[in-house]
Amino acid sequence: MKFLLGSLLLGLASASVSHAPILTGASVETPLTTFNLTTGANCACRTLSRTFSGVIFPRDTNYSAETVEAYWDVRTDLSPACVFLPETANEVAHAIKVLSSCDAQFAVRGGGHMCYPGSNNINGGVLMGLSKLNSYKVHSETIVVGPGMTWYDVYSALDPYGRAAVGGRLKTIGVPGLSLIGGWHYFNNKWGFAMDNVLSYDVVLGNGTQITVNKTQHSDLFWALKGGANNFGIVTKFTLKTFDVPKISTTIQAYNESGIPDFLEAVCHAAKLDEQDPIAAGMVASISYNVTTKAASASLLGVQEGTESPPSQFANFSAIPSTMKIDKVQTMKTWAQALDSPKQMFRVMYSHKTIKPDPQVLYMFYKIWKEAVDEISDVQGLYPTFVTNVHAPGASRVGKTNGVGNVWGLEAEPLILWQFSTGWALEQDDLRVQAWSRQLTEKLHAISVEKGLASDFIYMGDAGEWQDPFLGFPAENVLRMREIRSSYDPNGTFSRLNWGGFKLGV
Ligand SMILES: Cc1cc2nc3c(=O)[nH]c(=O)nc-3n(C[C@H](O)[C@H](O)[C@H](O)COP(=O)(O)OP(=O)(O)OC[C@H]3O[C@@H](n4cnc5c(N)ncnc54)[C@H](O)[C@@H]3O)c2cc1C
Ligand SMILES: *[C@@H]1O[C@H](CO)[C@@H](O)[C@H](O)[C@H]1NC(C)=O
Ligand SMILES: *[C@@H]1O[C@H](CO)[C@@H](O)[C@H](O)[C@H]1NC(C)=O
Ligand SMILES: *[C@@H]1O[C@H](CO)[C@@H](O)[C@H](O)[C@H]1NC(C)=O
Ligand SMILES: *[C@@H]1O[C@H](CO)[C@@H](O)[C@H](O)[C@H]1NC(C)=O
Ligand SMILES: *[C@@H]1O[C@H](CO)[C@@H](O)[C@H](O)[C@H]1NC(C)=O
Ligand SMILES: *[C@@H]1O[C@H](CO)[C@@H](O)[C@H](O)[C@H]1NC(C)=O
Ligand SMILES: *[C@@H]1O[C@H](CO)[C@@H](O)[C@H](O)[C@H]1NC(C)=O
Ligand SMILES: *[C@@H]1O[C@H](CO)[C@@H](O)[C@H](O)[C@H]1NC(C)=O
């Protein structure tokens, strides 16, 4: 999760786009069987293009729109053998049967925001883009949405009704990826995570069968989809709970370096807030550091339900001398509209761990991070950000008391997810930035452990591909997810063929 305040305010230009060569003839050995990437993809692409007119091959003009421009992280631009854009759930189901019978490796893309190469795109295999599954229907207390929608699309659809959903905090994040991994939003403290507010999923299983999954039907899979990511099937429809939120009170604040200790203290207080009948409120809180000017600055994007302005839940932030402050009352739609995260802006590495709120320790982490950033200041296009995401007790109490739960099994306790979001320009620096980010993360986490402040929780939306979020979930939940996977996907379509992303493992 990262707010591009810099790009929003300064209009930074996009980094240059590099494009990997098309792979041919490579075969891949998996622990289960040996099969041929090219043979499988050729079979699937040929079969799909006999039935559907819209299959896109590398020679076609729309190829780069689907394999490059649709992605946030430049590292996730890859070169599939072909791209299929289904228009209905039946077409998804048909394609899954083809992919499975051809033994073709494939990737699935929703909003294209996951910064994990291979999670949402594939070299030499088949890419299924869900952008055309973008229809929706608004009901009085729910909205039914297709996986081709962004959160801005959802907020826009609900705008005329004065309602809002618990989704993404920025404009163009995809509905499917965020809902399947959890969903940090401004309203978590009151209504839980995005995953806790999905009432029904339509799912295409690995053998092409379509099922509706809800609290009473396939209730085991219903639970597993709440945080279990892309391990079980392709979701072709989500029914989301909506809430009466005609207006929100927002605040955008920026602080120079002198404000950072108080800023981190206010973040820690926000994580501890736990009222009986809370006001839904949350934020994006991040610190950026410019290696050229050596200037650090913090920024707050604060949102609370209702029209009270300035928003009371951010009073501790508002008391810090700021370099910028914009308070407004508006709708979720107009707020989200301004918070774009431009595609293809840079190569980017996320890394994160979780800690119990302690302002002194968090400030120490920030200072160590800043010094460490100086050590890689020669990396071209460096765009380092230190992000803090708040988990207030109320956020996990929802899952603990709604009779469904989720795979995280978190206690209702205050936590801070601290994250490095590091952007850069050139492929030559990929391994170096990853090594730097990983080593620094483990070093700081060791300090949390030593101080008795560490949590094992890792959020997929804030993690790097080198991290394994399943290690941080309760072991019995992971075992249960594996059992559920073997009963719904016995043939391993979503492990062996669709192998990218945060997977439960073979
Ligand atoms: C700029 C930025 C801001 C962010 N802000 C937030 C935030 O505010 N809150 C938050 O919680 N997270 C946030 N994130 C993290 C974000 O939730 C994840 O990156 C998420 O995966 C994005 O969903 P997507 O649909 O855009 O992703 P994609 O990259 O398209 O998909 C992510 C994964 O889900 C799989 N998938 C996609 N669609 C389906 C489907 N229909 N069925 C099954 N599997 C599917 C893909 O194969 C892939 O493995 C942010 C990320 C970025 C880059
Ligand atoms: C995979 O198949 C392709 C063509 O279908 C072939 O050229 C290649 O040699 C095969 N690779 C292996 C390792 O069998
Ligand atoms: C290519 O994209 C254009 C514009 O989005 C669209 O009109 C056209 O149908 C697309 N072609 C294919 C083959 O998908
Ligand atoms: C299971 O996978 C094999 C290939 O490994 C494939 O031939 C078969 O059709 C698949 N079965 C089902 C039910 O999808
Ligand atoms: C679950 O879905 C089935 C089939 O669509 C429906 O009959 C049932 O009422 C649903 N249950 C809930 C709790 O929505
Ligand atoms: C503001 O800070 C005080 C301590 O100085 C704390 O008690 C209070 O809960 C905080 N309020 C909010 C809204 O975070
Ligand atoms: C930081 O910002 C505050 C508030 O605008 C200002 O009073 C202070 O002088 C600034 N400090 C520096 C070092 O720029
Ligand atoms: C850092 O500051 C320099 C000089 O003002 C500017 O050119 C550059 O874009 C800034 N870098 C980032 C990552 O904001
Ligand atoms: C598809 O898989 C599901 C889950 O394993 C199973 O219940 C169903 O019978 C399968 N359908 C077919 C047609 O094989």
Image: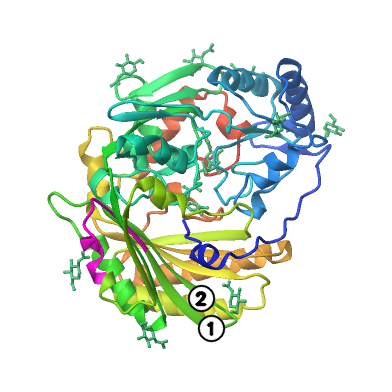
On screen, residue 237 versus residue 290, left or right, reads left
Q: Residue at x 75, y 29 (%)?
A: 41
Residue 398 lies in quadrant: top left
Q: Where is residue 268 drawn, in percent x and y?
A: 28, 67
Q: Mark 1 falls on what kind of element? A: loop
Q: Residue at x 36, y 39 (%)?
A: 159
Magenta region includes residue 286: no
Separation (CA) of disc 2 from disc 1: 7 Å
On screen, residue 299 versus residue 147, left or right, reads left
Q: Quadrant of the C terminus?
A: top right
**CB contact under 8 Å: marks 2 and 1:** yes
* Residue type of the residue flagged with mark 1: Lys
Q: Which residue is mark 1?
A: 294
Q: How was this image coloured?
A: rainbow
* Residue type of the residue flagged with mark 2: Tyr
**Residue at disc 1, CB closer than 8 Å to ligand 8:** no
Q: Which residue is mark 2?
A: 289
Q: Mark 2 falls on what kind of element? A: strand
Where does the magenta region start and end?
Answer: 301-316
Magenta region includes residue 305: yes
Is 316 rendered above or below residue 90? below
Q: Where is residue 130 drawn, in percent x and y?
A: 58, 32
- Mark toward the start of the polypeptide (2 vs 1): 2
**Residue at disc 2, CB closer than 8 Å to ligand 8:** no
Total marks shown come to 2
